[in-house]
Image (cartoon, grey):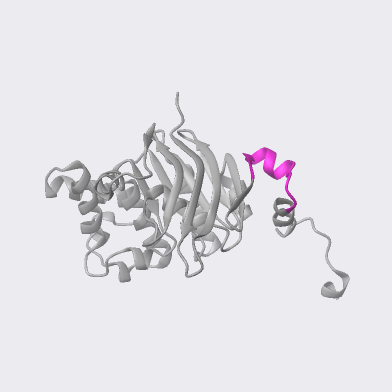
């Protein structure tokens, strides 16, 4: 079976008054169906820009080069009208801030319905059933009633669930989750991670975060980025057990461990 997603030598360049600047440099990886790739690195490492380049959502003026193939189909350079047909259908993205990603003027049910009808057609009644089922799938109580709520009527964790429901409404082959648990408390974070880990249907997941603890609990492969460059790539077991790059070792050393010795001065 061929890889679901193949990224080769992906670079992202921004124009500046001093000339073009490479902010993502020659990133390469593959993703199989039912696999989770964790992309990890500090803020400004290029994680989110890599994801936006895959989705064809780079800021105005930015240019992507290299190759991004979804099920063998090249995405880079395709007209935006073609990418719009793929986004929300074959590939979806969960953004870091759900409040700014949801339209405050429409109910969440209507927004999920719109995604479904855009890509699948069907009646409004059929789309409503899909929206309610999607909200139920992500664990929102009273999904039929909550479908009539506006984004501001939900908590942060509930809005993130709505975003996941919207992303999954058309059963995409590829799901990219960009820091989806950053602003959530640990209990809600664990619930969101379970939702993503329990996905079905042969979907590949790219999970972007700076949190190595999250990556260790969900990823099968890990890509480590620093200053726009790929510094390490391998299975989660390899990267966590035998990191080859100093930066990866530094990231791992920065994670508190429950068996770390207690500093005498602090304990005093």
- Residue at point 31%, 44% (across, down): 78
Residues 190 and 48: in front is: 48
Q: Please give the range of residues in magenta.
A: 232-246
Residue 252 as seen in the image, left or right of residue 34: right
Pinpoint residue 18: horizontal percent, then vertical percent: 51, 68
Would residue 234 be counted in the magenta stretch?
yes
Pinpoint residue 99: horizontal percent, then vertical percent: 36, 67
Would residue 20 be counted in the magenta stretch?
no
- Residue at point 42%, 65% (across, down): 97
Tell me if I can see residue 205 in this picture. Answer: yes
Return the residue found at the far front.
18
Residue 144 as seen in the image, left or right of residue 62: left
* Above or below, comparing residue 239 to residue 103 in the picture: above
* Above or below, comparing residue 9 to residue 146 in the picture: above
Pinpoint residue 159: horizontal percent, then vertical percent: 37, 62
Residues 237 and 125: in front is: 237
Which image quarter is the N terminus in? Answer: top left
- Residue at point 45%, 33% (across, down): 33
Residues 45 and 26: in front is: 26
Pinpoint residue 36: horizontal percent, then vertical percent: 51, 41
Tell me if I can see residue 140 in this picture. Answer: no
Residue 201 figure quarter: top left
Residue 70 as seen in the image, left or right of residue 42: left
Which image quarter is the C terminus in? Answer: bottom right
* Above or below, comparing residue 70 to residue 256 in the picture: above
Residues 108 and 141: in front is: 108
- Residue at point 45%, 51% (across, down): 51
């Amino acid at each position: 079976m061929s890889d679901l997603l193949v990224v080769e030598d992906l670079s992202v360049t921004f124009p500046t008054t001093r000339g073009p600047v490479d902010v993502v440099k020659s990133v390469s990886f593959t993703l199989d169906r039912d696999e989770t790739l964790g992309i990890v690195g500090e803020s400004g490492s290029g994680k989110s820009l890599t994801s936006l380049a895959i989705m064809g959502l780079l800021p105005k003026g930015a240019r992507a080069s290299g190759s991004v193939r979804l099920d063998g189909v090249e995405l880079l350079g395709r007209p935006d009208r073609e990418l719009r047909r793929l986004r929300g259908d074959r590939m979806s993205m969960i953004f870091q801030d759900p409040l700014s990603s949801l339209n405050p003027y429409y109910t969440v049910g209507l927004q999920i319905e719109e995604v479904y009808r855009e890509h699948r057609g069907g009646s409004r009644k059929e789309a409503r059933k899909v929206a309610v089922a999607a909200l139920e799938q992500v664990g929102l109580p009273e999904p039929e009633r909550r479908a009539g709520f506006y984004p501001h009527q939900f908590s942060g964790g509930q809005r993130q669930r709505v975003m996941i429901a919207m992303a999954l409404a058309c059963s995409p082959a590829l799901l990219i989750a960009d820091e989806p648990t950053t602003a959530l408390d640990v209990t809600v974070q664990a619930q969101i991670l379970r939702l993503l880990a329990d996905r079905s249907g042969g979907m590949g997941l790219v999970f972007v975060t700076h949190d190595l603890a999250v990556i260790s609990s969900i990823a099968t492969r890990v890509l480590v980025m620093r200053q726009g460059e790929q510094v390490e790539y391998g299975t989660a077991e390899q990267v966590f057990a035998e990191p080859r790059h100093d930066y990866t070792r530094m990231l791992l050393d920065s994670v508190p461990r429950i068996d770390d010795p207690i500093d005498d001065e602090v304990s005093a």
